[in-house]
């Protein structure tokens, strides 16, 4: 039997099976009445749809979509999957958030800005709203479900602008604020998909690789259902990938600065560009400067949310657990007083502070290894992907939706060899929601070490193997 005939007979059947896995898993998740209560079933379905996701990507990218008559089946399959990806988002959009309450803060902040000004969320924590003359109609069910209401917002100006647009449209139409907001976030998600396809086309690679983003169960569930604003950041990251891939660094810098205006992760990838070219850096500096405006005008309390996040948050971590134990061993406990330092003649250092300092040092070493060899402009996105991957693996906080930051680089960064590690992390990330399940069972929020180990160790093994064998050019 010829290879062509074998492909004709076997390839479509395998593709159909992968599509069934992807659709069945997603449909099951979206029809669960409460995924937290049925978390084992949720994880099993997420695994099934993840297997289908990987299989469909392989099916579409087994031949390039170059416009010739021989690629017609692949092109038809690709556009069919694009339609299915959009339909899946619509289904997820109709479902209420299950694991995260972040979106309710977005809704409240978007509405309150229309009544009290654009700096209000930075200056006044939601818990203080009743004492600050906030209209009682804004203290609704969304306000009641805000996580850590004692802290002011941590979301930069672009994210706040989108929240405000959704809030304004909701006020105009008399409600549906949550739906409008999630719709805007899904539009940003779809725009990310389009930019990734463009970047792949520009570099002459199969646009089917954009399905790494477009069909990702993690993206669909965390953006369309949970309503995480990370799609605004990935939109900027993807624009940056397109700009640098097309050797247009001004666009690249502008994209990553835009990501910073939505979520500060854009700052992490900026050194990859600065190491290679400064053309466009002034544009980035001008845009990033806008991040400071709310803090300048909102007053002294505006940075409390950011400070608390940087010093207190911990969830889903891997390497940080090891560094925390090491810090405790060095200090001989949870804290130690170091004489001869500080304005009072002594300095109290906690193991969490020391561990975070060690994370900064390890990440600096990681960045030096990644950035040291020379590369051209088209190699910038691959290095940026490695920087973000290192940050998340070392960070004290790894929420499942953070992994979506990496998927644009896995899909479209030329020469990015960490694709397998990122895809593996995206497949395992849904298990990071397990504390919400455990809290429902016995009222205690527990982040189990063995679950985190199952997620982090395979990814670290893949990453270290790749770094050990990486070419000197990138």
Image: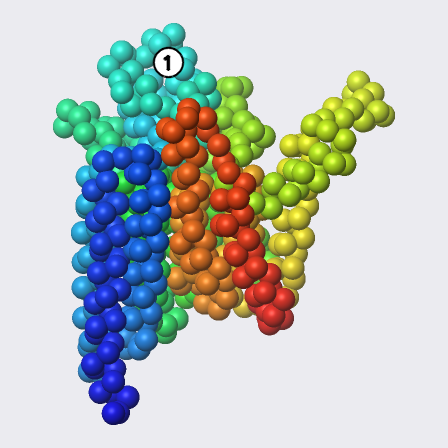
Q: Which residue is found at the position 80% from the left and 18% from the top?
A: 344
Say if 13 sits above or below 27 in the image: below
Residue that mark 1 sits on:
129
> Residue 392 appears at what percent x and percent y?
52, 47
Q: Nearer the viewer, residue 450 or 269?
A: 450
Q: Nearer the viewer, residue 395 or 199?
A: 395
Q: Nearer the viewer, residue 155 or 299?
A: 155
The reply to whether residue 348 is visible in this rendering is: yes
Q: Nearer the viewer, residue 184 or 94?
A: 94
Say if 164 sits above or below 410 in the image: above
Q: Which residue is found at the position 18% from the left and 29% from the top?
A: 176
The quadrant of the image that shows the N terminus is bottom left
Say if 135 sits above or below 366 in the image: above
> Residue 77 appears at what percent x and percent y?
21, 69
The reply to whether residue 298 is visible in this rendering is: no
Residue sticking out furthest to the bottom: 1
């Amino acid at each position: 039997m010829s290879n062509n005939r074998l492909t004709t007979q076997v390839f479509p059947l395998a593709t159909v099976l992968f599509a069934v896995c992807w659709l069945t898993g997603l449909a099951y998740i979206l029809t669960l009445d409460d995924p937290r209560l049925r978390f084992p079933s949720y994880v099993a379905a997420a695994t099934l749809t993840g297997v289908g996701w990987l299989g469909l990507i392989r099916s579409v990218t087994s031949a390039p979509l170059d416009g010739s008559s021989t690629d017609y089946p692949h092109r038809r399959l690709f556009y069919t999957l694009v339609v299915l990806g959009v339909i899946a988002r619509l289904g997820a959009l109709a479902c209420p958030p299950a694991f995260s309450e972040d979106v309710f803060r977005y809704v409240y902040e978007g509405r309150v800005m229309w009544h009290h000004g654009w700096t209000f969320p930075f200056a006044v924590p939601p818990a203080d709203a009743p004492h600050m003359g906030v209209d009682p109609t804004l203290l609704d069910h969304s306000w009641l479900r805000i996580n850590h209401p004692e802290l002011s917002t941590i979301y930069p100006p672009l994210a706040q602008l989108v929240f405000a647009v959704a809030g304004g449209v909701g006020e105009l139409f008399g409600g549906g604020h949550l739906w409008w907001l999630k719709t805007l976030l899904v539009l940003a998600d779809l725009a990310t998909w389009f930019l990734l396809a463009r970047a792949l086309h520009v570099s002459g690679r199969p646009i089917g690789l954009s399905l790494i983003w477009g069909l990702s169960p993690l993206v669909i569930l965390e953006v369309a259902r949970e309503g995480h604003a990370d799609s605004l950041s990935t939109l900027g990251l993807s624009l940056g990938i397109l700009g640098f891939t097309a050797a247009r660094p001004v666009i690249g810098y502008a994209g990553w600065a835009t990501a910073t205006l939505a979520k500060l992760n854009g700052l992490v990838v900026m050194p990859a560009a600065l190491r290679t070219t400064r053309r466009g850096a002034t544009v980035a500096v001008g845009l990033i400067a806008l991040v400071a405006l709310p803090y300048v005008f909102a007053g002294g309390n505006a940075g409390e949310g950011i400070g608390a996040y940087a010093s207190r948050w911990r969830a889903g971590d891997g390497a940080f657990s090891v560094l925390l134990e090491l810090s405790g061993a060095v200090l001989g406990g949870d804290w130690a007083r170091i004489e001869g330092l500080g304005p009072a003649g002594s300095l109290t250092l906690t193991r969490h502070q020391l561990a975070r300092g060690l994370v900064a040092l390890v990440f600096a070493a990681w960045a030096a290894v990644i950035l040291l060899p020379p590369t051209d402009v088209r190699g910038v996105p691959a290095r940026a992907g490695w920087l973000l991957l290192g940050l998340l693996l070392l960070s004290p906080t790894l929420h499942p939706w953070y992994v979506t930051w990496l998927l644009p680089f896995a899909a479209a960064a030329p020469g990015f060899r960490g694709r397998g590690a990122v895809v593996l992390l995206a497949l395992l990330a849904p298990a990071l929601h397990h504390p919400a399940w455990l809290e429902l069972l016995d009222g205690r929020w527990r982040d189990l070490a063995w679950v985190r180990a199952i997620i982090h160790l395979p990814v670290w093994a893949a990453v270290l193997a790749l770094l050990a064998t990486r070419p000197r050019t990138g």
